[in-house]
Image: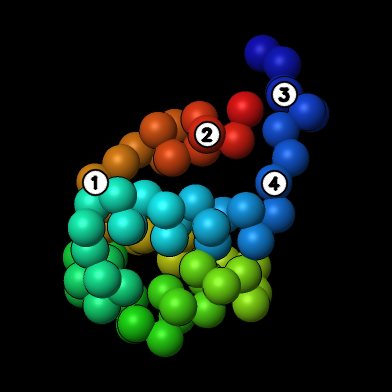
Amino acid sequence: MSIDNDMRYSHLDIGKHVAYLRTEKGWSAYQLSLASGISNSVLTRLEKGEREPMLNTLLKVIEGLDLSPAEFFKAFK
């Protein structure tokens, strides 16, 4: 098993991707925060890239978007 060391992304990239996927669903940030079980303020900071998300928070958002982690991260290859 090898690790792909070429996969690079920042918290800004993650935030932009979350916002993109949310708007593709036609959802407001509030709707995604409800679906994810996180506060709207945490989601807003994540989307703006103001801080690097904790793994459990990011996994909640990915689940709220009805995606698997693999589906979410395939955009970064």
Q: Which image quarter is the C terminus in?
A: top right
Marking on residue 66: 1
Question: Earlier along the polypeptide chain: callout 4 or callout 2?
Answer: 4
Identify the disc placed on residue 9: 4
Q: Is residue 67 visible?
A: yes
Distance, label 4 to label 3, CA atoms, is 15 Å
Label 2 vs label 3: CA separation? 17 Å
- The answer for how far apart the CA atoms under marks 4 and 2 are is 10 Å
Crowd around label 1: few <14 · some 14–19 · many ≥20 (10 Å): few
Q: Would you identify the image quadrant in which residue 48 lies?
A: bottom right
Query: Nearer the observer, disc 2 or disc 3?
Result: 2
Q: Amino acid at mark 3?
A: Ile
Q: Which residue is mark 3?
A: 3
- Regarding residue 63, the answer to whether it shows in the image is no
Residue at (54, 61) in percent of width and height: 15
Circles 4, 3 touching at the beta carbon (< 8 Å)? no
Q: Residues within 10 Å of mark 2 (few under 14, many from 20)?
A: few
Which residue is at a point 67% across and 13% down the rendered structure image?
1
**Which SS class for mark 3?**
loop
